[in-house]
Image: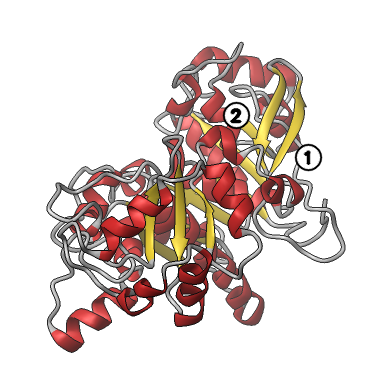
Amino acid sequence: FVAGLLEGIKILDLTRLLPGGYCSMLLADMGADVLKIETPREGDYMRWNPPMLKNMSALFAAINRNKRSITLNLKHDEGKKIFERLLPEYDVLFEGNRPGVMEKLGFGYDTVSRINPRMIYCSISGYGQDGPYRDEVGHDINYIGIAGVLAMTGLRGGPPVVPAVQIGDLAGGAMFAAIGVLAALIGRSQTGMGRCVDISMTDGVVSWLSIHAAKHFADGDNLERGKMRLSGQYPCYAAYQTKDGRYISLGALEEKFWVNFCRAVERSDLVEKQFDDSDGPSGALKQVSAIFKQKTLAEWLDYLDAYDICVGPVNTIEDVFRDPQVLHRRMLFETDHPTEGKLKQIGMPIKFSGGNGAVERLPAPLLGEHTESVLRSLGYEANEIKRLREAGAV
């Protein structure tokens, strides 16, 4: 484990579900001390999403390692007082409520910054803290729909295809939140002051349109599904079914890679058809498709390995975690959870010199597991903690 990168940075995480949970896990993996604030009894909704392990959801365990958990009722007067005592001790606050909710609870950015002027206050929402959609509800499919990604995804002539991975939640929300917070922490080291970081998941997805928008602005192309350079329009960049029903990816965009492919399959007549997009049976897409159906996936990978071509398997999720490159990069590891047993976990995607890429410091916490220890660190005695529990404040 690469200790010390974010050691000393203390984070309060009030978020639920995927965007905030994944974001704070990334920072926790890099050494930050993350304290997860959860409502009494219910906690983060993801705790109860199937499939269940023994006492918690496998999904919750997957994105909440290296965190501590306390229960705190921010609608209770004494719960508010405890939170006020926590704020000066922390560097970053994440919240993922609808805009305006934290203000109603009495802990909007203006209030929190008066209590702790050094606080980095990060709000993650679907559409941001302002604008005509500010108060609208939404999910990933809505964000990528508004941002244009859904309309561009799918086969030529077919309907939009919903991506299996939550792009808005993970990339638009979680990853941009992590970048924003890290930038704000660097800024604070120069000014001594915190700031608000406003993350819209929709904004994040729109920002991914950089090269697509550049083409649209330059030549007016409306970028139809299946008719774009990198979305299956051309035979040199597509996924093809093999003899055994599996799929292989071909990414021969550069001329040299396409020529190498044509030589490998002994089809020099296809060299000039690298960017042929005709639909008929004589079209290059159909011809290359027929070629790939002549061998199994394993046979193709073995045969083409001798050539300098951009090819690879289209892995199922089971295949991913047997892939030698994935395993070598330690993107899968096993951990022992005190109540859930042995768990397989995804590794840290950012590698640093001076460490082996391990991420485990703490297993995903039980609901409120650290409530008593945190309250004791704030000066609460055992009898006070018992009273607060009985009153529903924690």
Q: How is the image coloured?
A: secondary structure
Along the line of sight, the residue nearer the viewer: 215 or 196: 215
On the image, the x and y values in percent for residue 331 come to 68, 46
Q: Which mark is residue 61?
A: 2
Neighbours of disc 1 within 10 Å: few (<14), some (14-19), many (20+)? few
Vertical comparison of 365 with 143: above or below: above
Q: Residue at x 20, y 55 (%)?
A: 134
Please identify the residue farthest to the right as the structure is shown.
354
**Left or right of residue 341, residue 244 in this image:** left
Q: Residue at x 37, y 41 (%)?
A: 164
- State the image quarter where residue 144 is shown: bottom left
On the image, the x and y values in percent for residue 251 come to 45, 65
Along the line of sight, the residue nearer the viewer: 273 or 7: 273
How far separated are the C-alphas under marks 2 and 1? 14 Å
Amino acid beneath label 2: Ala
The residue beneath circle 1 is 361
**Can I make out residue 352 in this image?**
yes
Vertical comparison of 43 with 270: above or below: above
- State the image quarter where residue 353 is shown: bottom right
**Can I make out residue 87 in this image?**
no
